[in-house]
Image (cartoon, rainbow, N blue to C red):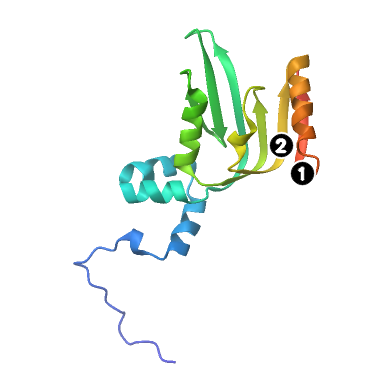
Amino acid sequence: LESPSSPIELPIDQPMNILSLPVVFLRDMMERVKIKDRLSLRLTCRAFDKLVAETNYGFAYDGVVQSYFDKQHNSTVFAMRIDNVEFKCTTEDALKQLLHIRNRLFREISFRNFNICDEFLPLDFISAFRIQEFGLVARSESELQHCLQIMANFPTSKRTIKIYLIP
């Protein structure tokens, strides 16, 4: 095969629409986009908002869901961290807000390590997560019992489940 003697010229007057690329390519691309960039893409246009929400995130090394009392604002804070990006909610329907954020950023996500530091968090919250190592934090006897119950619910799980007891 001979190479063309002159480079192929593309029309400059017609911009390329990235959303016209094949769906397989777009999904693969979205798995590589970081969480902060997914947030920015969502704000670009409705088509990107939909693309972000309907695609998988890919792989995150670690994630945490926890609640804690913020003395400065005198309120309970629910937080979700994916790698180094943290989402915080302080309203009464904070869990609904975190679920909404989760559903807007990805359809599914894979974690190497994921910890839950809240005994009241329903397990269906992590239904969109693929987790290799699942950690539960217990700070009291009742939280330890809750962790043991969660472990009992996953008898044939392929996950490694760890319980961290913090006195």
Q: Residue at x 59, y 20 (%)?
A: 67
Q: Say whether residue 96 is left or right of residue 153.
A: left
Q: Residue furthest left?
A: 13
Q: Say whether residue 144 is left or right of residue 104.
A: right
How far across and how far down the image is residue 51, in percent? Answer: 41, 51
The type of residue carrying mark 1 is Ser
* Pick the front one: 84 or 50: 50
How far across and how far down the image is residue 65, in percent? Answer: 60, 29
Q: CA distance from mark 1 to mark 2?
A: 11 Å
Q: Residues within 10 Å of mark 1 (few under 14, many from 20)?
A: few
Q: Residue at x 46, y 35 (%)?
A: 101
Specify the quadrant that holds the N terminus.
bottom left
Q: Is residue 118 visible?
A: yes
Q: Residue at x 48, y 22 (%)?
A: 93
Secondary structure at badge 2 equals strand
On screen, residue 64 above or below 127: above
Q: Residues within 10 Å of mark 2 (few under 14, many from 20)?
A: many
Q: Residue at x 51, y 52 (%)?
A: 32
Q: Say whether residue 34 is left or right of residue 130.
A: left
**Residue denoted by label 2:** 134
The answer to whether the residue labelled 1 contacts the one labelled 2, judged by CB atoms less than 8 Å apart, is yes
Secondary structure at badge 1 equals loop
* Pick the front one: 97 or 124: 124
Q: Is residue 165 visible?
A: no
Dividing the picture into quarters, in which one does residue 44 lie?
Answer: top left
The type of residue carrying mark 2 is Phe
Q: Residue furthest bottom?
A: 1
Which mark is nearer the camera, 1 or 2?
A: 1
**Residue denoted by label 1:** 157
